[in-house]
Amino acid sequence: MKTSKRVSSRFISAERAAEMIGEKGLAHCLRSIATYIEQDFCRWQDFDKSARVANHSQDGVIELMPISDEVSYSFKYVNGHPKNHRYNLPTVMAFGVLADVDTGVPTLISELTLTTALRTAAMSAVAARALARPDSRRMALIGNGAQSEFQALAFHHLLGIQEFHLFDTDPAATAKLMHNLSQQGIVAKRFASTREAVCGCDIVTTVTADKTNATILSPDMIEPGMHLNAVGGDCPGKTELHRGVLEMGRVFVEYEPQTRAEGEIQQMPAEFAVTELWQVLTSHREGRRDASEVTVFDSVGFALEDFSALRFMDDLACELGAEERISLIPELPNPKNLFGFLLDHPAQAKPQANTRTSACVA
């Protein structure tokens, strides 16, 4: 005899996500997401992968990022609109879904704006642990917007970076970052240019927002032994590094087919050699070869990282008893009688609206 199953989905709102992260601590969450990412990258071959689907407009991009293994499917909806600050909106906004592969039931619906900031920073730290010099202690942050605090905290807690050099074309963004880092007990210095900020640094992170082919770093700024974490270039026509920088050292990517279209290497010919990071994490390929080598992580953000972050948030919500439930799928005694669900939920009678005070005005 067939029995109906509850199909309500767990839900994590932005407010609930912030509360959960606050309860466990930001350092713990960054470390945990990094661990989940490493676990999933080390089983790279288990996933059905594809580059994200993007719809571009004059002012931004909206993307869908799908991936699955034999158990779970996930996707992220995410945008990138650099001018959104004019409307008091984040540049990047996102939500995500985890679903059961066997039935297609969405098991989790979650905010991913805040979580994406954590997963992007955690991904940067995972790459840097594999590629940067182990004695790295000083990092430059070029671009001091919404992602910058998370990058700084991930590198501080996961790699032991002690000092941060800051530069942004918007002085208010740098002031914001300095204030927030000081509240976390982190030393940061403001500089008047990118060139001054990167001088003497072990790691340089670029995380700028403008949707342009920019030259944030040029070859004459690069010092032997630097690790470059290029985060801001993440769609066609948007880059941060002069192509000469890419020719100075080895380049590592998340998923090569996607990075060829969206990353710094979109500037390079198809035969330009890169290494996917999973190969380093599983010891199939070498990471850094010596202390003087320049390494580049051409980070565009890949769906597997969101899969990992959603897994972590789902587990955390269950641990804390923090998940809510929402009804997305009709519960049907007879799955062939969807029309019956409509009949079982007739419209409720409502008082006649006062046309003079109605909020809906034609």
Image: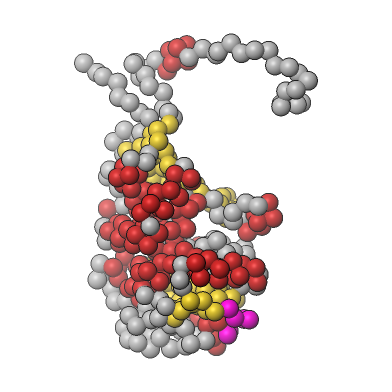
Q: How many tags in the picture?
A: 0
Judged from this view, the residue extending furthest toward the left is 1
Looking at the image, which residue is at 33% across and 48% down? 316
Across and down, in percent, residue 285 comes to: 28, 73
From this viewpoint, is residue 93 visible? yes
From this viewpoint, is residue 53 visible? no
Query: Residue 339 or 30: which is nearer the viewer?
Result: 30
Across and down, in percent, residue 66 comes to: 42, 48
Quadrant of res 178: bottom right
Q: Is residue 189 above or below residue 317?
A: below
Q: Is residue 313 above or below residue 329?
A: below
Looking at the image, which residue is at 52% across and 86% down? 199
Looking at the image, which residue is at 65% across and 56% down? 85
Q: Could you tell whether 261 is left or right of 171 in the image?
A: left
- Which residues fall within the magenta stretch? 190-196
Query: Residue 157 or 70: which is nearer the viewer?
Result: 157
Q: Is residue 87 magenta?
A: no
Q: Is residue 126 above or below residue 329?
A: below
In the picture, which quadrant includes the C terminus?
top right
Q: Could you tell whether 120 is left or right of 175 in the image?
A: left
In the picture, which quadrant includes the N terminus?
top left
Looking at the image, which residue is at 38% across and 51% down? 23
Query: Residue 4 or 276: which is nearer the viewer?
Result: 4
Across and down, in percent, residue 305 comes to: 38, 56
Q: Could you tell whether 76 is left or right of 322 in the image?
A: right
Q: Could you tell whether 7 is left or right of 77 in the image?
A: left
Q: Is residue 194 magenta?
A: yes
Q: Is residue 246 above or below residue 86?
A: below
Query: Residue 2 or 19: which is nearer the viewer?
Result: 19
Across and down, in percent, residue 310 comes to: 38, 49
